[in-house]
Image (tube, rainbow, N blue to C red):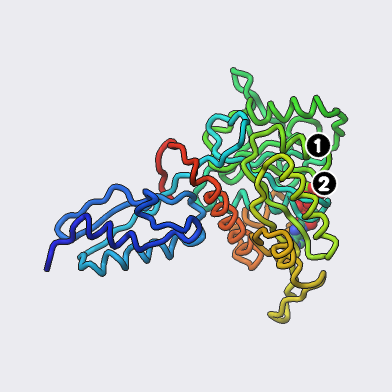
Amino acid sequence: MANVTESAVLGALSRVMDPDLNRDIVSLGFVQNLEIDRNRVSFDVELTTPACPVKDQLKQQCIDEVAGLGAVSVSVNMTARVRNAPVAGKELIPGIHNLLAVASGKGGVGKSTVAMNLALALSQAGARVGLLDCDFYGPSVPSQIGNFDRVQANEQRRMLPHEFQGIKVLSMGFMVERNQAVVWRGPMLHKVLTQFLFQTEWGGLDYLVLDLPPGTGDVQLSLAQSTPVSAAVLVTTPQDVALKDVEKGLRMFQSVNVPVLGVIENMSYYKCGNCDKKHYLFGKGGAARIAKGYNIPVLGEIPMDPNVQGKLGDGQPLLARRDDSEAAQAFRAAAGRTAARLSVISQDWAVPGPGAMEV
Ligand SMILES: Nc1ncnc2c1ncn2[C@@H]1O[C@H](COP(=O)(O)OP(=O)(O)OP(=O)(O)O)[C@@H](O)[C@H]1O
Ligand SMILES: [Mg+2]
């Protein structure tokens, strides 16, 4: 049997395509640490996100391609290094690769729920994740995780976020007494937000998820404008009127040059316990109409499920319960698609990170 050579292995692996970046993994520089020892082949594949939705398929394709050369064994180690998405003309937060805003034109559609579960899904996939509750007037992160403790500062007067299931969390609700109203005006809010972003010990983060307050008014606009947000996802519900809200959200982010990665339709449908049928209580196809009308992808359709809510204040968001329900799977899929889309806008601007990590 002929020896398996480096060039043969790279040639075989160049047939493996990253479907999001639309290029082969060799020319993308993903194949690293290739070692060949008497027809035993091992290498790393460094993806752009540990939450890559096709990670397992890519790994299998790599194995199949190299095995096809006659290798006795093929060992593939999947790693990931998240890149920075571009933020035109804005100061980056040291150590944070991407700020991902979760927004909606309308209140109560499930932004906070989506933001929390996206953060958990990305973290569970192996990313380093933070969640910043930007809703100063109605913070919801403390009740979502059942923790209202004040945050502390370190000797350098930098805030120490709370940790919840591996994610760093910060909220106005950790700064004031429970149920105490915040009555600050714009400039003060801006100052506190800047402090939350720049004066907090976030550590290294791949994704800092921002849970935005409802609407597309001045507060949201200045937030999108004054912070180095890489991209946004819009949360919507299936009603027809939601289309208009999506349009408002899109316009707002476009006006400040923040790309919208796509739409997550929440409360899409309901499955009752007795049958396996999807009941579209608010109408069907809303997300698809949005995708078509505004040329942006649907990143996920999350069913309505009483378990999503949990008991208010019990500190157990759905993905924190290691749940495997359809809703949980929908959140994971949405997180994967979101991260993949973020990788796509990051690709031409790749900067060296602190090194690959195991996933
Ligand atoms: N898929 C779902 N199934 C069932 N309940 C849900 C679902 N998504 C969200 N909810 C519930 O709907 C309510 C509103 O959700 P959430 O607080 O996340 O919305 P929001 O858009 O952040 O609201 P606000 O605009 O006030 O910030 C919550 O009680 C939440 O638990
Ligand atoms: Mg909210």
Numbered circle sitting on residue 215: 2
Query: Which image quarter is the N terminus in?
Result: bottom left
User: Identity of the amino acid at label 1?
Assistant: Val
Q: Is residue 304 above or below residue 185?
A: below
Q: Work out how far the residue at label 2 is from the one at label 1, CA to CA, in angstroms.
A: 9 Å
User: Identity of the amino acid at label 2?
Assistant: Gly
Check disc 1: other Cα within 10 Å, few if <14, some if 14-19, many if 20+.
Answer: some
Residue 130 shows in this picture:
no
Residue 39's spot in the image, x, y percent?
Answer: 17, 61
**74 displayed left or right of 270:** left
Residue 49 shows in this picture:
yes
Residue 202's spot in the image, x, y percent?
Answer: 58, 33
Numbered circle sitting on residue 8: none
**Residue under the point 74% across and 63% down:** 293
Q: Which residue is mark 1?
A: 219
Q: Quadrant of ligand 1?
A: bottom right
Q: Are marks 2 and 1 in contact (CB under 8 Å)?
A: yes
**Residue under the point 82% across and 69% down:** 282
- SS type, badge 1: helix
**Residue under the point 72% across and 61% down:** 265
**Residue under the point 80% across and 60% down:** 243
Check disc 2: other Cα within 10 Å, few if <14, some if 14-19, many if 20+.
Answer: some
Q: Mark 2 and ligand 1: say if the CB distance to the nearest ligand atom is below 8 Å.
A: yes
